[in-house]
Image: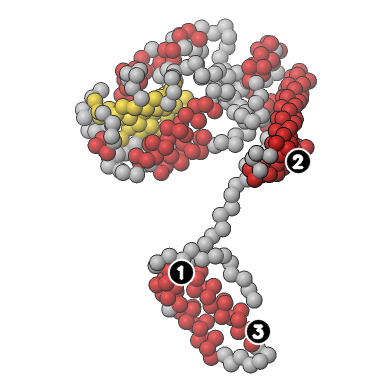
Amino acid sequence: MNAFPGGYKWTKSSTSQFQDALCHPVCKSLLNNFMNHEYDNEDSERAVPDFLNIINVAATKANIFRHKSSKKRKPNCKWFDSDLGVKRKILVSKGELLSKFPYDPIVRGSYYKCYREYNKLRKYKMRTFKQSILNSLDNLRDSDPKQYWKLINSLKESTDDSKGKLMTFQRRSDAHYVSLVLDVQSLGSSYIGPGYNHPEKHHATPQGLDSFPSIFSYPHSERPAQHWPNVVSLITNRPQDSKMICVHDKHEDTDPQYMSSNLSDNKDHEVYYRSEDNECIPYSNKYKEVATKYMENGEKTRNPGTPNLDEDTDINMKELEKEANEQKVGLKNNMNKRDYGKIFSFSISSIRSHLCICFHTACFLLQFPTRKI
């Protein structure tokens, strides 16, 4: 007997759908062949799979099978080896036993002892992995620069695809633009521009709209020039104590609307609306968490071309920056400018930055106060 490909997702409309599927020419042909075929005692075992085949074909055409959902397994860190895996399984089993007997002193003592041993071993593995990476970088720095950068690029590992979530958010909410804006005015003279810059070159302080460059923009890499003056005005004039505001500009033909939300003490995101769409409002509320996580992931490395290291590996980029700064004179002759700029990064934890999102929806759909720019 052939097994069914999956369970049924039976609803109120499944009965009529299955009846309509049985009336399909293919199912009718199978039913006629089944009814006209004379099964004797020897062929009786064939009747069951033939009948099940008719049910499977009709159920497939009615689309009432429940598809199995396969959960994506989160990959372990590079320093997570088999010893830690065994220790974690023991800890989980002791935790399940503790949930059954929470007041047993022997069970509690055994669990917390295993918990301390697991954390101690985990920190040791992490520390050993970090030290091995630093030793390899130190050895390959002068002997083999190509392998040096290959090792750094191999550390690119992101378990949380924040950029992909931003792209999904833009597509589902019909957003016009998603941009990450840097407030250069808060940096003062320390801002020298993106990418590689020669240390002896004089850099003029950006003025006007150039003092708010777009670090990340989607779906286009360039910033939306038409709306950029309004975005900059919204960033500079937004009250510091306001958590979320909505600005509606009626002076333009497109009748744009911008929403500004405070993500943290020094991070904001702005939204631009233009046509009526109720579905984008829940996406806008959910986006605040995604944008905050994207900003937090960017605090380690956010310079163009800089590797985005995984949080679990906990590689200290300040140590890598120190190593590169000490040897930048020797590396200048061996590497091109693009590779030379990869190692340098800046932390945006102390930088006032903004997220600008442009949507197509109406102002009255939002439950926020509005004002003109």
**Identity, as a three-letter code, of the amino acid under mark 2:** Val
Looking at the rendered structure, which numbered label has been put on residue 86?
Answer: 2
Q: Residue at x 31, y 24 (%)?
A: 230
Q: Label 3's element?
A: helix
The reply to whether residue 227 is in sight is no
Residue at point 68% right, 32% down?
154
Q: Position of residue 217 (x, y in %)?
A: 44, 30
Callout 1: few (<14), some (14-19), or many (20+) C-alpha neighbours within 10 Å?
some
Closer to the observer: label 2 or label 1? Answer: 2
> Can you identify the residue that label 1 sits on?
62
Q: CA distance from mark 3 to mark 2?
A: 48 Å
Question: Quadrant of the image for the N terminus?
Answer: bottom right
Give whichever of 347, 207 is nearer the camera: 347
Near mark 3 (Cα within 10 A), the count class, few <14, some 14-19 or many ≥20, is: few
Q: In the rendered structure, are the residues bearing label 1 and label 3 in contact, judged by CB atoms less than 8 Å apart?
A: no
Upstream in sequence: badge 1 or badge 3: 3
Task: Say which residue label 3 marks.
Answer: 45
Quick one: label 2 or label 1, which is nearer the N terminus?
1
Q: Secondary structure at mark 1?
A: helix
Asked whether 289 or 78 is in front, the reply is 289
Q: Quadrant of residue 14?
A: bottom left
**Residue visible at 68% across and 44% down in the picture:** 97
When the figure is inspected, residue 70 is found, relative to residue 111, above or below; the finding is below
